[in-house]
Image: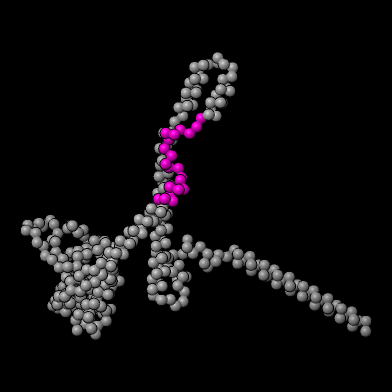
Amino acid sequence: MASNINEGRREDALVKQRNLAREEFERQKQQLINETEKARPSAHRFVGQNDSMEDSLKYSTVGLVKLEEFQQRRKELEEAKAREAARTDELKEEQRKVKKRKKAAKSTLSFALDDDGEGADSGSGTATPNGNDDDSAKRKKFRKNPNVDTSFLPDREREEAERREREQLRQEWLKRQEDMKKEEVEITYSYWDGSGHRKSVLCKKGDDIASFLEKCRQQFPELRGVNVDNLMYIKEDLIIPHHYTFYDFIINKARGKSGPLFNFDVHDDVRLLADATKEKDESHAGKVVERSWYQRNKHIFPASRWEVFDPEKSYGKYTIA
């Protein structure tokens, strides 16, 4: 009977000891997890500094969002990135100017008071036993030289005023560009199926080529059953991708193989004297063709001259103002 009681007590002690060991193990495990989480960088930490604009856009547009919200968010991120880049460039430029001004200021600092004091001491010699006391009193009275240029020194108020002015000018420039994109322009084009059928359409400078082709498609009955993706716009022997806008070519003064890409009317060279060293002042109507027609005839002139527009490639400098 006594042995059973002892066995029961021993079993209870072992169970209690096991429970304490399990609790201690769980506490240490949780502590280790917490320390690991603290040391590990968060997925959203430093997003604005380290992540690219595409990653930030991806994080901020998780789930189903409207196209307008997506475009607005992307525009805000692009503006923030532009402001950050401009601020970084301005800071580097300011630091470079500060270093240059510091080097120039070293030669302009004046210590004429020290020289005068030393000259007076050397002239007087040891006539007065308290000469050292007089020198120390004079040095205490020295002040900053008002003739020294201090514009290179940091000035928080001046820098803040300059930043506000730059931001205001940037907003004014963006507003002017938006107003320019809303201006209307008449585009003269020719539907090309082996022969030209010339017409014109009214578009805004901010419209892309896809919107322009959609308006062209409505003007020809034979094109109404053709999708916009199966239409091509050729300007000055260059195939213009659908995502470009007329504003892109106007603002960059882009040119093609045979003329400017930023003139959308049609006119001939009216100069009386022809000069072979100068480019002709001519603008040709852009061609709207079906992609299937181009695939069948791309080995025949004029389609054999056409190539896809590359903004990085130079097609020559346009010499006509």
Q: Is residue 149 magenta?
A: yes
Spot occupied by residue 205 in the image (x, y as percentages of width and height) = 26, 68
Segment colored magenta: 142-162
Quarter occupied by residue 179: bottom left
* Residue visible at 63% across and 65% down in the picture: 35
Where 169 falls versus 191 (above or below)?
above
Expressed as whole percent of the image width and height from the top left, the position of residue 139 reads 53, 28
Q: Main secondary structure of the magenta part?
A: loop
Would you say residue 18 sits in the magenta stretch?
no
Residue toward you, 173 or 278: 173
Question: Residue 292 location, x and y as percent?
Answer: 22, 81
Q: Nearer the viewer, residue 170 or 239?
A: 170
Task: Determine whether 86 is above or below 56 in the image.
Answer: above
Q: Height in image: 81 above or below 97?
A: below
The structure residue drawn at horizontal position 83% and vertical position 79%, both measured from the top left corner, is 11
| Residue at the limit of the structure toward the right, as seen here | 2
Point out the image quarter for the C terminus: bottom left
Q: Is residue 316 left or right of residue 107?
A: left
